[in-house]
Image (cartoon, rainbow, N blue to C red):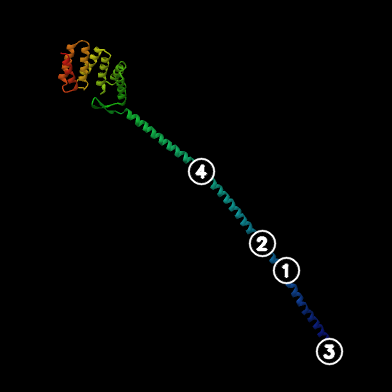
Amino acid sequence: MMFRASRNQVLAAVLLSAALSSVPAHAALFSDDDARQAIIDLRKEARDRSDQQAQQLQDALSRLENNQRAQLQLAGQIESQQQEIARLRGQIEILTKQVADTQQAQKDIYLDVDTRLKRLEPQAASIDGQQAMVDPGEKRSYDAAIDMFRSGAYADAIPALSAFVRQYPQSPYTPAAQFYIGSSQYALKDYKAAIAQQQALVKNFPTNVRAPDALLVIAGSQVELNDRRGARTTLERIVKDYPGVPAAQTAKDRLELLK
């Protein structure tokens, strides 16, 4: 009985020992699986992080490329705008010059028109000591004709002065023009024509300052034609009708010579 008990005890001890020895082996096997899984998880996490970082890097590169393209586009736009500004500045300079040229041309036109109008406007002139308004063209025509008389070109002065009288019959210069026509005729010894011309002057302008001088020319022409009586009558008329003027004293002196 004791042998059996011991055998049973030994068997139990062996079984217990085997059971106890199997526990560490199972535990070790379980730990390796966990480690493998942990390694797999770590590798997966590393790959995920690597992929995430790679994606982030790719996104950053894409953003950088987009920024670079945007900067290039902006630089191109700035350059285009600068070129457009330069073109507009050139146009502004051209337009500014055109405006300045146009304004200057308008000023020149206005000045030219004003000058021409002034040439056409009546001007004040002193005629035989009297102030009168005459047209510029009228004055030029008279001056040109009277210059012929003053230079001794009597044959040329007569038609020039006659044309002036026809063109400007109401001119303040007309009495003087008629007087110089008669004086030119007297200088050319056309005494009858001189008498007729000066008589017309005295008849048409009896109060004009040239009237007594015209009568002196008539008297001189009458003397040249041997009409001493007529000359005396003309000189007496001067003394009577125009006393106090220089021609009256001249008439008195000539009357003394005709006695």
The answer to whether residue 1 of the structure is visible from this angle is no
Mark 4 vs 2: CB contact within 8 A = no
The amino acid on which the numbered mark 4 sits, given as a three-letter code, is Ala
Give the mark nearest the N terminus, 1 or 3.
Answer: 3
Secondary structure of the residue carrying numbered label 1: helix
Quarter of the image holding residue 36?
bottom right
Judging by the rendered image, the residue that carries numbered circle 2 is 50
3 or 4: mark nearer the eye: 4
**Residue 98 relative to residue 220: left or right:** right
Judging by the rendered image, the residue that carries numbered circle 3 is 2
The amino acid on which the numbered mark 1 sits, given as a three-letter code, is Arg
Which corner quadrant holds the C terminus?
Answer: top left
- Nearer to me, 108 or 42: 108
Give the mark nearest the N terminus, 4 or 2.
Answer: 2
Q: CA distance from mark 3 to mark 4?
A: 124 Å
Q: CA distance from mark 1 to mark 3?
A: 52 Å
- From what the image shows, is residue 50 above or below residue 125? below
Secondary structure of the residue carrying numbered label 3: helix
Give the mark nearest the N terminus, 1 or 4.
Answer: 1
**Residue 227 relative to residue 90: left or right:** left
- Nearer to me, 191 or 251: 251
* Residue at figure coordinates x 38%, y 35% from the top left: 107
Name the residue at the top extreme.
226
Secondary structure of the residue carrying numbered label 4: helix
The amino acid on which the numbered mark 3 sits, given as a three-letter code, is Met
The amino acid on which the numbered mark 2 sits, given as a three-letter code, is Ser
Judging by the rendered image, the residue that carries numbered circle 4 is 86
List x then y, in percent, for residue 214. 22, 18
